Amino acid sequence: MSDFSRRRFLQSAAAGAFVAPAFVAPRRLRSPVAIASENGVKAVELAVQRMNEGWRPVDAAVAGVELVENDPEDDSVGLGGLPNEEGVVELDACVMDGPSGLGGAVGALQSIKNPAQVALKVMRHTDHVLLVGEGALRFALAHGFVAENLLTEKSRQKWIEWREKRSSIDKWVSPEENGEHGKEWFKKYAHKTGTIHLGAVAANGDVGSCTTTSGLAFKIPGRVGDSPLLGCGNYCDNDVGTGGSTGRGEACILSNGGAFVVHQMALGKSPTDACMEAVKRVVRLTKVKRLLDDQGRPAFQVKFYGIDKSGQFGSAGLYADQFAVCDEKGARLQDLASLYDDKIR
Ligand code: ASP
């Protein structure tokens, strides 16, 4: 597609038409492309391999993230994820399939190490999009998933350490802390974030995407982040591309990050520029002082990822970091575009 016809197509899509005009000839990409958070180098490699074997992008994305869900050393996803404040691992995930426009998600799911696979079942075997908690677990068991203890010894030790000091470092906030006097709260009490988002585009331009996480460490039980919320931690539109996020989920939910990235691409922005627009939106919407550092910047990391149908990809975050990508040049890490030059933590 020429740049001109692509722009016209994207503008009509953005205007709400979402019907591919006749002049949009499907163009085969040289290779499928997959993008992920920095813990996803092996995941993007596998996703591209699966798409080369003819898998649908959403299934390839889930196969990729499963490697990370099964890795007990990654304490932000699946098995070995850091637990909630009561020491229970609760997982969130969602998937979205471009060609059908369908999605599926689970929130606060206990005992099942592959929530992205359960989200696929929600998408394919129900009339719903999101199942949470006990209902999500019963649905997973009905589909033959096996319940197991997801708390590894290493994660349990980190939880015990947190619990011993927890009097002032939990996630409960008073209305006063949420106002003027809470200025230093976030910096002091923030915990490491993780998660994997994976966006995939097949050689024929079809897209699919997935995000899976154990969420913020030591969260209040029942807390659901951006990762299982379509339009927040993950979104895709087969006429445009995929968008997703990792980092402080509350900031992504409040800015509807994933859908915003896709919408910016529909307006003609490159994936990197679309992600940077989402970062700036987070900055504009973060007003509470306890979430700001002494320079007035958000005191947390949020990163966005995007691929468009033509296989262009990009990522941007508040602070310097990397992302994983795989295309015809193979799987690798690249620096993302950051609003601030320094690293957080
Ligand atoms: N976005 C995830 C959440 O808020 C956490 C993360 O990406 O580190 O649950």
Image (cartoon, helix red, strand yellow):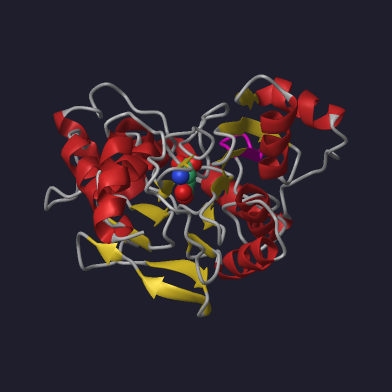
Name the side, left or right, on which 60 lies relative to 188.
right
Part of the protein shown in magenta: 84-91
- x and y, in percent, of residue 35 in the image: 48, 61
Residue 74 location, quadrant:
bottom right
Number of marks drawn = 0
Q: Residue at x 35, y 60 (%)?
A: 315
**Main SS class of the magenta portion in the image:** loop
Which residue is more in the foreground, 268 or 255? 268
Which residue is more in the foreground, 79 or 322? 322
- x and y, in percent, of residue 150 in the image: 74, 46
Q: Residue at x 47, y 42 (%)?
A: 236
Q: Which part of the image, by quadrant, shows the N terminus?
A: bottom left
Q: Which part of the image, by quadrant, shows the C terminus?
A: bottom left
Which residue is more in the foreground, 194 or 52? 52
Residue 202 location, quadrant:
bottom right
Name the side, left or right, on which 5 lies relative to 106.
left
- x and y, in percent, of residue 19 in the image: 41, 34
Q: Furthest residue to the bottom?
A: 329
**Compared with residue 206, is residue 311 higher up or lower down, i.e. above or below?**
below
Q: Is residue 86 magenta?
A: yes
Q: Is residue 310 magenta?
A: no
Question: Is residue 273 visible to the viewer in this orientation of the structure?
Answer: no
Name the side, left or right, on which 166 lies relative to 161.
left
Residue 46 location, quadrant:
bottom right
Q: Residue at x 71, y 51 (%)?
A: 79
Question: Is residue 152 visible to the viewer in this orientation of the structure?
Answer: yes
Q: Residue at x 43, y 43 (%)?
A: 239
- x and y, in percent, of residue 114 in the image: 72, 46
Q: Furthest residue to the left?
A: 295
Q: Furthest residue to the front?
A: 22
